[in-house]
Image: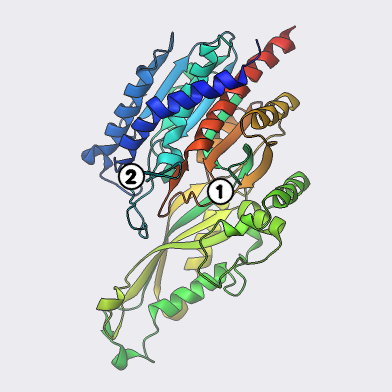
């Protein structure tokens, strides 16, 4: 049976407006920060609250034969596991997460991380787009097919609660649930981005991430800067020297070859195609201050910079008092949090070891320098998309967005994808999402673009239907 596009669109829109949106609004109010940012998450109870809210909504969907378990391994964040029977033994695995990044400063007046606000079809607040919407999109898509009696394969939905911490618990759950999951031949991940809100964007790669805390200590206590200046090296100057080992501060280029990987020709061509669509939006989506601009102006090169080349960010610092409290003291030390994105195919463990070696060897002026890694997540490079899936995503994009599907890498990291890519090398992948221009995941003013969430839900339904049809044709 062919999908009735208008009926499916109407069903998904109604379910989003009447059922999913009120739940997402309540979810945004829960400060269920990922364990990396809330070590006492278990005692606080916010994660359990979010998990139980999502599980309760899922159970109310009354999907025939659905089995839902909140799985809890000792000492680990919980995981929602949903198993929905289908008309074939093939398996579609759908993935999302419900843990959140921390608050971050800079929210504009009237907005906040735990205060949901709807404005111009945008739902503001932490976690709606990254990645709370995925649970609702997954089940609404499946229900939309059921409403038209469109057959689909067995569907397994996994919603984890530590993705923003690098998914440290997920491998243990995948191992524990291996027999129940089986071998999916299609994986749909709804935790990625989109270049614009005008078409479906398929993620072709994700960068890896290594990082940790770099600490420099030069004194046992702070001293008068007039007394010590010129004798005691500044810990901040030592920090600058160390960072310069990693990054050329004049260009932002990462220095060592070990942090790079060869970019496949196909991905370069896709970057050029995406640049042709996005043009200046590649960088104008970021809130530059007046007069500021991107590192360079070749749009395709900017896309490759954020998807296939390493980049360093300093995401936090200790030892620096607020300006209002900054007396004339040469401080005892400085500590910063480093985040180094690495190419999709780079070895994260080797990159982390190289970073530690660069920073700790031959410390300037004999300062005490330590680097404590806390992130080491590999990237992911999608297998070649099968012709049936390429046709399905393009058809879905045309049906619900009105424009063809686009293919582009993303600069973020989803550890689950690399894990699944290794475990299920024969699987096909549709990695997509709603994080488009100005959505600002992890930062202030994060929002979910509601029309895009609804359209992505429709596209997921269409692809699941096409997956089943393809299987039937293949068998015959």
Left or right: 322 as drawn, with respect to 261: left
Secondary structure at badge 1 equals strand
Left or right: 156 as drawn, with respect to 263: left
Residue 311 lies, with reference to residue 410, above or below; the image says: below
Secondary structure at badge 2 equals loop
Residue on which the image places disc 1: 208
Q: Residue at x 59, y 35 (%)?
A: 431
Viewer-closest of 70 and 57:
57
Residue 75 in sight here = no
Earlier in the chain: of badge 1 and badge 2, it is 2
Q: Please rate how many residues cluster around mark 2, counting C-alpha atoms within 10 Å: few if below 14, some from 14 to 19, many from 20.
A: many
Q: Residue at x 60, y 59 (%)?
A: 283
Q: Residue at x 58, y 14 (%)?
A: 153
Residue on which the image places disc 2: 33
Viewer-closest of 176 and 134:
134
Coordinates of residue 255 in the picture (x, y in percent)? 62, 67
Residue 322 lies, with reference to residue 19, above or below; the image says: below
* Image mark for residue 368: none
Between marks 1 and 2, how big is the CA–CA gap? 21 Å
Q: Can you tell which quarter of the image residue 186 is in?
A: top right
Quadrant where the C terminus lies?
top right
Q: Residue at x 61, y 30 (%)?
A: 400
Quadrant where the N terminus lies?
top right
Coordinates of residue 168 in the picture (x, y in percent)? 42, 40
Viewer-closest of 40 and 433:
433
Q: Can you tell which quarter of the image residue 325 is in?
A: bottom left
Which one is in front in this view, the residue at disc 1 or the one at disc 2?
A: 2
């Amino acid at each position: 049976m062919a999908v009735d596009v208008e009926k499916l669109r109407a069903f998904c829109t109604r379910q989003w407006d009447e059922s999913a949106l009120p739940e997402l609004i309540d979810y945004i109010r829960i400060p269920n920060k990922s364990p990396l940012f809330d070590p006492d998450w278990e005692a606080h109870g916010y994660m359990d609250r979010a998990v139980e809210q999502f599980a309760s909504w899922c159970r109310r969907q009354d999907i025939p034969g659905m089995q839902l378990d909140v799985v809890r391994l000792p000492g680990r964040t919980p995981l929602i596991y949903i198993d929905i029977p289908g008309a074939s033994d093939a398996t579609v695995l759908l993935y999302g997460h419900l843990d959140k990044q921390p608050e971050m400063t800079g929210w504009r007046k009237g907005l906040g991380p735990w205060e949901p606000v709807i404005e111009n079809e945008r739902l503001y607040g932490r976690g709606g787009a990254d990645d709370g919407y995925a649970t609702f999109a997954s089940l609404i898509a499946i229900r939309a097919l059921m409403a038209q009696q469109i057959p689909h394969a067995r569907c397994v939905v996994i919603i984890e609660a530590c993705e923003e911490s690098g998914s440290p618990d997920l491998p243990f759950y995948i191992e524990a649930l291996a027999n129940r999951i089986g071998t999916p031949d299609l994986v749909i991940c709804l935790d990625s981005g989109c270049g614009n809100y005008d078409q479906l964007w398929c993620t072709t790669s994700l960068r890896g991430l290594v990082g940790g805390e770099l600490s420099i200590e030069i004194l046992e206590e702070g001293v008068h800067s007039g007394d010590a200046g010129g004798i005691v090296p500044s810990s901040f100057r030592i920090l600058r020297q160390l960072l310069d080992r990693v990054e050329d501060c004049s260009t932002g280029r990462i220095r060592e070859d070990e942090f790079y990987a060869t970019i496949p020709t196909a991905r370069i061509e896709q970057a050029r195609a995406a640049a042709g669509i996005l043009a200046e939006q590649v960088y104008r989506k970021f809130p530059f201050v007046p007069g500021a601009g991107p590192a360079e102006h070749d749009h395709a090169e900017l896309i490759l910079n954020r998807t296939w080349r390493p980049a360093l960010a300093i995401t936090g610092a200790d030892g620096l008092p607020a300006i209002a409290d900054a007396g004339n003291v040469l401080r005892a030390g400085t500590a910063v949090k480093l985040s180094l994105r690495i190419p999709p195919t780079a070895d994260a463990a080797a990159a982390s070891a190289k970073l530690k070696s660069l920073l700790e060897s031959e410390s300037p002026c004999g300062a005490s320098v330590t680097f404590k890694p806390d992130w080491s997540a590999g990237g992911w490079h999608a297998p070649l998309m099968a012709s049936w899936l390429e046709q399905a995503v393009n058809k879905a994009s045309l049906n619900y967005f009105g424009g063809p599907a686009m293919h582009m890498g993303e600069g973020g990291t989803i550890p689950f994808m690399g894990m699944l890519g290794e475990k299920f090398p024969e699987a096909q992948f549709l990695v997509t999402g709603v994080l488009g221009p100005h959505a600002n995941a992890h930062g202030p003013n994060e929002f979910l673009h509601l029309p895009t969430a609804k359209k992505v839900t429709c596209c997921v339904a269409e692809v699941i239907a096409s997956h089943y049809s393809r299987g039937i044709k293949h068998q015959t």
